[in-house]
């Protein structure tokens, strides 16, 4: 299993950190968890493309977690030329309605899709890529999920848990992946110390957790419950007993030399596992950092 961080940023514009996205390569499957703006660009930089992706899991439908979903579906459909199986998509409701409104008859991309399906020039390119006319429309295989659901792949199982974020307006989930090669929990945008996320993440090798704010700088207490802070993140990692905590979803204000070290020092007083300050395109060691002997 290989875990790569695609996007470790927020909705705020940043060239350094794209919005949320994570890549898990396991067996023959290539899974993306969230696909916010810029995550698809990072996917290409990580050496994969849309047609390699087999499964997409979306934790919630804030745009910083799903704006590259149409890009993934359309590029996969376009260059895939009906030669790759339909993308399997797992996300909270109303992902089915959203998908239909994007790619269905009369949807946002209907003029583009109609032109590519009907214009002879587009059909020629489609056939040059190996497709056989008539060309199908994009048809991702969409499943609406809820907490407690378990999705089984060839060599992995993903369990859905509830996060604490902006309910009841958006359902917000976390995902736990178990396999023979190790375990991972991605908490979505769960804020504060969420008991359901602690339970979901218990004992995993790698926990990827949002740290949007430095403790004490949240605009309001409601914001703290929604977005959490670095002390909350440390408590989640400690209570769940994870081997490695990967911090992500950073605002620029805490992503500064000096501030970063202070945050890590405070977190290490609470949680004594490995802490990794996530960066775009960073590959995460499943069993923790290797100890290199001193020469
Ligand atoms: Zn977010």
Image: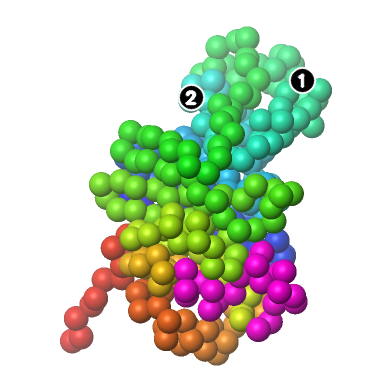
Q: Residues within 10 Å of mark 1 (few under 14, many from 20)?
A: some
The CA distance from mark 1 to mark 2 is: 21 Å
Q: Residue 41 in the image: state x and y as whole percent.
A: 59, 51
First in sequence: mark 1 vs mark 2: 2
Q: Quadrant of residue 68?
A: top right
Name the spot of residue 106 as percent of width and height, x first: 81, 23
Looking at the image, how many numbered discs can be counted on the residues? 2
Q: State the residue at coordinates (31%, 70%).
A: 289
- Could you tell me which secondary element the residue under label 1 belongs to? loop
Magenta region includes residue 1? no
Report whether residue 221 is seen: yes
- Of 136 and 194, nearer the camera is 194
Of the 4 image quadrants, the one containing the C terminus is bottom left
Image position of 231 (left or right of 116)? left
Could you say which is closer to the camera, residue 281 or residue 229? Answer: 229
Specify the principal SS of the magenta part.
helix
Look at the picture and state if 101 lies above or below 172: above
Q: Which stretch is magenta?
A: 216-236
Where does residue 202 sit, x and y in percent of width and height? Answer: 38, 59
Residue 217 lies in the magenta stretch: yes
Residue 284 rendering spot, x and y as whole percentages: 39, 62
Which residue is denoted by mark 2 in the rendering? 85
* Residue visible at 61% across and 80% down in the picture: 214
| Residue beneath the point at 65% across and 67% down | 225
Q: Quadrant of residue 220?
A: bottom right
In the picture as drawn, the residue positioned furthest to the top comes out as 134
* Residue that carries the numbered disc 1 in the rendered image: 105
Is mark 1 in CB contact (under 8 Å) with mark 2? no
């Amino acid at each position: 299993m290989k875990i790569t961080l695609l996007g470790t940023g927020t909705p705020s514009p940043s060239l350094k950190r794209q919005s949320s996205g994570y890549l898990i390569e396991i067996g023959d499957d290539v899974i993306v968890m969230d696909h916010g703006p810029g995550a698809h660009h990072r996917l290409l930089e990580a050496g994969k493309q849309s047609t390699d992706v087999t499964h997409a899991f979306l934790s919630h439908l804030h745009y910083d977690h799903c704006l590259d979903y149409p890009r993934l579906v359309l590029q996969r459909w376009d260059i895939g030329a009906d030669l790759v199986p339909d993308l399997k998509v797992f996300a909270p409701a109303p992902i089915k309605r959203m998908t239909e409104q994007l790619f269905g008859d009369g949807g946002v991309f209907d003029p583009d899709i109609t032109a590519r399906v009907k214009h002879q020039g587009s059909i020629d390119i489609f056939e040059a890529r190996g497709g056989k006319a008539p060309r199908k429309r994009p048809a991702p295989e969409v499943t609406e999920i809820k907490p407690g659901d378990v999705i089984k792949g060839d060599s992995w199982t993903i369990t859905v848990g509830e996060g604490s974020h902006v309910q009841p307006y958006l359902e917000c989930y976390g995902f736990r992946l178990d396999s023979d090669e190790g375990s991972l929990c991605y908490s979505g945008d769960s804020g504060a110390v969420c008991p359901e996320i602690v339970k979901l993440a218990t004992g995993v090798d790698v926990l990827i957790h949002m740290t949007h704010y430095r403790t004490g700088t949240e605009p309001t207490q409601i914001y703290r419950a929604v977005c959490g802070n670095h002390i909350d993140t440390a408590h989640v990692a400690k209570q769940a007993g994870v081997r490695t905590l990967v911090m992500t979803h950073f605002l620029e204000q805490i992503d500064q030399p000096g501030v970063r070290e202070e945050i890590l020092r405070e977190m290490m007083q609470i949680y004594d596992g490995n802490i990794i300050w996530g960066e775009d395109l960073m590959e995460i060691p499943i069993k923790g950092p290797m100890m290199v002997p001193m020469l």
